[in-house]
Amino acid sequence: MKRLLPVLAPVVVAVGLLLVGWAWLRGYTRHNELMRVPDLAGANLAEAEALLAKRDLSALVIDSVFVEDRPKGTVVEQDPDAGKEVKAGRKVYLVLNANQPKMIDMPKLVDLSKRQALSVLDILGLKVKEMQYKPDPCVDCVIAQLYKGKPIAADERIRRGEAITLVLGAGEKGERVPVPDLSGLSMADVQLVLNMASLNLGVLVECQGCNTQADSTLARVRRQSPAAGANNRIALGSTIDLWLTSDTTGLRPAEGWNDPSRYTSPDSLHEP
């Protein structure tokens, strides 16, 4: 036994050190101690930090975005997602809703076609307030860009989400386009179709059953003026008045309503 002691002693010491190290590491990493990540959506930063602190978690803001229909300064995204189980001490990364949209450079839209201009505005997060038409040989070409009724130069700073008026060429012969069928479309889809058809939104006469903002968002067109029809043509830039309803039973848009080729291009109206 005495002969084995010098051999066994280092082994016992090594095993003991390993056990002590393993126990320390287990405690240091809080092995098997998991916390469920709370849902922080809609909470401001102070509220989010308090909720996380109760579960031995912490917050780290990594970005901000601007979402118009969300309260300013509140959480719009989080990582890890709500309900995930993580180790105590973990950071939860947050994206907050900014108080103001980001500033961007106004693009140069003059001399672009309407389709190109709409694409650029959409990519940059700008909206179309109105399409005005004036006599010009280049039909549906942008001849001016306006912001709040005044010309805005390219590279001028503007907030994302602002609305731009496009002044477009109407040709020299008073070109006219067919009135599109907007029945069954939501307001977002209506704007898409009107842009493709080179027309503008007129008066929202009525929204039956619309008691909340959500009702209005989901409402669909039940009537329009002037009425749709391939032979019913109106001038470029004309307006269409709408009647909406929150009762969408039986309201379905026409098949292929979002096909650009469905709407006559003004360019084709003066081709030989």
Image (cartoon, rainbow, N blue to C red):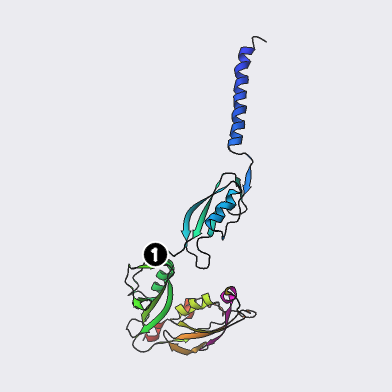
Asked whether the viewer can see residue 141, the reply is: no
Asked whether the viewer can see residue 202, the reply is: yes
Left or right side of 161 for 78: right
Q: In this figure, which residue is indicated by the disc labeled 1? A: 103
Tell me where the magenta segment starts and ends, as one range: 214-227
Q: Amino acid at mark 1?
A: Met
* Residue at 41% across, 80% down: 131
* Residue at 40% across, 83% down: 266
Q: Residue furthest right?
A: 1
Q: Residues within 10 Å of mark 1 (few under 14, many from 20)?
A: few
Up-down relation of residue 44 to residue 164 (above or below):
above
Residue 256's x, y, as percent?
Answer: 54, 77
Residue 108's x, y, as percent?
Answer: 33, 70
Q: Is residue 174 magenta?
A: no
Residue 1's x, y, as percent?
Answer: 68, 10
Q: Is residue 216 magenta?
A: yes
* Residue at 56% across, 56% down: 47
